[in-house]
Amino acid sequence: MDKLQAQKKNNRLLIYGLRLQINHHNHLYYVLDKPAISDAEYDKLFKKLVELEKEFPDLVTPDSPTQRIGGEALKKFKSVTHKTPLLSLDNAMASPELEAFDKRVREALGKDKIDYVAELKMDGLAVSLIYKKGKFVTGATRGDGVHGEDITQNLRTIKSIPLVLNEPVDLEVRGEVYLPYNDFIKHNEERKEAGEALFANPRNAAAGSLRQLDPKIAASRPLDIFLYYGAANNQQSHYETLQYLKQLGFKINPNIKLCSGLDQVQAYIKEWDKQRETLDYEIDGIVVKVNNLAAQRELGWTARAPRWAIAFKYPPMQATTVIEDIKVQVGRTGAITPVAYLKPVRLAGVLVQRATLHNEDEIKRKDLKINDQVVVQRAGEVIPEVVKVLKHTADSKEFKMPTTCPVCAGELFKPEGEAITRCVNSACPAQVKERIRHFATRVAMDIEHLGPAIVDQLVVNKLIKDVADLYDLELADLLKLERFAEKSAQNLLASIQASKNQPYDRLLYALGIRMVGRNTASLIAQHFDSLEDLFHIKADKLDHIYGVGPKVAQSVEQFFAQEENIKLIERLKESGVTIKTNQTKGPQPLKGKTFVFTGSLEKMSRSEAEEIVRKLGGHPSSSVSKQTNYVVAGAEPGSKYDKAKKLGVKIISEEKFRNLL
Ligand code: IVH
């Protein structure tokens, strides 16, 4: 061996040794939460490795701990087809459903008592990780269960995901990525400072971080993972599989429990209902899995979920707090909504400070007063609400609806028999902002980079006062503003430009006509080729359209009777915004057909399916009637299925639906 070769071998050994040490300490710190050396000592090792790799770049390999944040920002995520679908779990909302599950399992297996593994159900984002010869090669989101997105670059930045395993095995593991609760709070505070939109909950924050094309963003957030499933080798039970995954270097939740029979599962559920607040991450239930893998195979799967597992969901979390104040908010249509400002309280993993009170009648009905002690509740995604008053206090005082608008001081009006009070000044800055925000949303004109904070800035600085003004914005206007640099300003202008080509039914929805939702807009657009055909339209020309009721028709008439709305549309047209049906639209095989979707679809979300129906000339609707042509039933269909049966409406599967396209 010549000198050069010997030196090279020596360097390789040095680098290899450092990597082993660093990986070991990474594992101790991030996976086992038991660091053995100080941060400074760790940094020293890391720095040494970085220096050596810099000196000998041909010795750098992708599995080196220095390479977690590698590569450029992507243009788009690649799609990944999962080898076996990532199915979801059936839910048990209460004890009887859990008992029924246990009974089914016992009967199917012919046993009196089943061994289960009970696990916490983390509320994060499901991912699949693929290892080849012990090296992490691909990581993907669940997506629609069959196709996910390749987010390998982002997953590599999560330090508790090993880049190299302790054995050179080929395997797929699945788990849940989450953002610890305290980091979520901290991160939201930073966003608030920066004037960015806040994440509603830790799950959204985790998902938002993993869906960033630039891996530096995921790397800057302390994401973590627990693995809960693996197609490993020769294990007899799920519990053993998890132990094996742990040996390989994966992070497994320490609170899993082997339970003999349902009673022990019930005890575990009770225990964690009390303890969940002590965790530093959010859980929304308990997953119960049959432990024996041969038994799992015998039970098998339905199209949607395994028969050997069930998710017990905890009921919505409630907490007690105090209403410190009640203030009103002004919405897009001028609706005045009272909002309770609460003494901050942690609820289902989220710090809650506000709750909607809907309207004045609701406040009266619940007898809510400022300084009352109340019970608040948060269920899933919905905005927290006040369930009831626990007690009035000595300081309790009645809330009085304002008589003038709190934003523009204009007149308020509450029509006879209606619950909602409105500000009637359509130039009210609060309404202006909300209208523009609505216009820009994803389902409307989908103007990227035009979030609520930016709209606020544009309106406050008097650059825009309505949606047509957006199309007159120029680079120089934006550059004067605080938050814009050349690049961000250009990005915004490009998105505004791109929105000109949105199909006109989106524009019709984006105009924010009261009672005209996405589906109604597309229905009207199918009957009228241009927005100009709707100018000064009378309600009786509309309410014969199936799916458009008299109230909706009235609202459309009112909107197009107003000269200022017509002027607005004319200005949009002058700017080049599409205001008529695109004559070069594709084939319309579903023309005139009405579809209702029920249950969960496997290959697409409901809104995607509805968008496809619209594109192909059909009409999606949310309620079944005799005029419905097809009801598409996914897994666990709801009452629409029964109604379709009763009315004799044709019911088809998702697969049949796809064949129609
Ligand atoms: S097992 C076939 N275990 O819950 C295996 N899922 O509603 C199916 N989840 O998409 C999943 N914690 O993202 C399993 N300990 C756990 C879980 C868990 C959270 C999520 C998972 C899945 C969803 C099912």
Image (tube, rainbow, N blue to C red):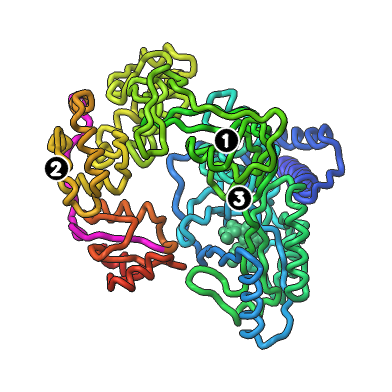
What number is the disc on residue 124? 3
On the image, the x and y values in percent for residue 390 come to 68, 43
Q: CA distance from mark 1 to mark 3?
A: 17 Å
Q: Mark 1 falls on what kind of element?
A: helix
Q: Is residue 601 above or below residue 424?
A: below
Q: Is the CB of the residue bearing disc 3 within 8 angstroms of ligand 1?
A: yes
Q: Mark 3 falls on what kind of element?
A: loop
Q: Which residue is mark 2?
A: 529
Q: Residue at horizontal 70%, vertical 77%?
A: 292
On the image, the x and y values in percent for residue 402 come to 48, 24
Label 1 environment density (alpha carbons within 10 Å; few <14, some 14–19, many ≥20): some
Q: Quadrant of residue 388?
A: top right
Quarter of the rendered structure image containing ligand 1: bottom right
Q: Which residue is mark 1?
A: 217
Q: Is residue 285 visible?
A: yes
548 sits to left or right of 335: left
Q: Amino acid at mark 3?
A: Gly
Question: In front here: 414 or 109?
Answer: 414
Q: Amino acid at mark 2?
A: Asp
